[in-house]
Image (tube, helix red, strand yellow):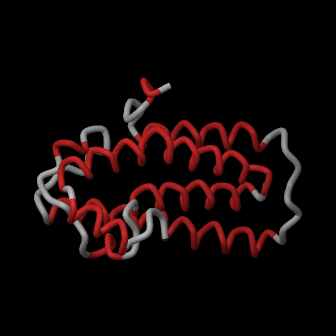
Amino acid sequence: MSGLEKKLPPLALLLLFALVLQLTSYWLPSSGLPSSLSLSLAFSLLAAGLIIPLAGVLSFKRHGTTPDPRVPEQSSALVTSGIYRCSRNPMYLGFVFLLLAQTFFLNSLWLLLLVALFIAYLQRFQILPEERAMQQLFGDPYRAYCQRVRRWI
């Protein structure tokens, strides 16, 4: 299964899961949350899901390193400032928020199971291989960073 590591671009994975959430929602019952609450949560999560990854990409650009998660070994700088002081994976965190926003917009909490599957896939096939590459590339400074900052939040 290591053949899946870093093969599927995370943005493509996000779009695939968003489509699966949409299609699956037709067969699942509504959560019964009041629509005002569900929509408020959806729009709040949508805002966070757009702002957080954008902050991550901008931090990478400011440091002149690649934001392409498929080639972490091409990173030219270890970014630990900005949003990266709070999360080692703000782009992926934002993607999760976008899927959660869709879940609340569709008002079906059953879809949280698919969001959990998205997180598990990212963790196994994207984040862990990225972390191995970053440890090889940056060594002790990266290990110290991992001690200070959580993987997600």
- The front one of 9 and 20 is 9
Q: In this view, does 40 lie to the left or right of 25?
A: left
The correct choice, above or below, for 119 with respect to 49 in the image is above
- Identity of the residue drawn at 27% across and 59% down: 57
Q: In this view, does 144 lie to the left or right of 112?
A: left
- Identity of the residue drawn at 77% across and 59% down: 107
- Identity of the residue drawn at 25% across and 62% down: 142
The number of discs equals: 0
The correct choice, above or below, for 112 with respect to 79 in the image is above
The correct choice, above or below, for 71 with respect to 4 in the image is below
Q: In this view, does 79 lie to the left or right of 33?
A: left
- Identity of the residue drawn at 14% across and 66% down: 62
Q: Quadrant of residue 19?
A: top right
Q: Residue 50: give x, y in percent of width and height.
A: 43, 63
Name, please, the residue furthest toward the front: 140
Q: Residue 143: give x, y in percent of width and height.
A: 29, 62
- The front one of 77 and 99 is 77
Q: Residue 43: give x, y in percent of width and height.
A: 59, 69
Q: Residue 127: give x, y in percent of width and height.
A: 42, 48
- The front one of 27 and 149 is 149
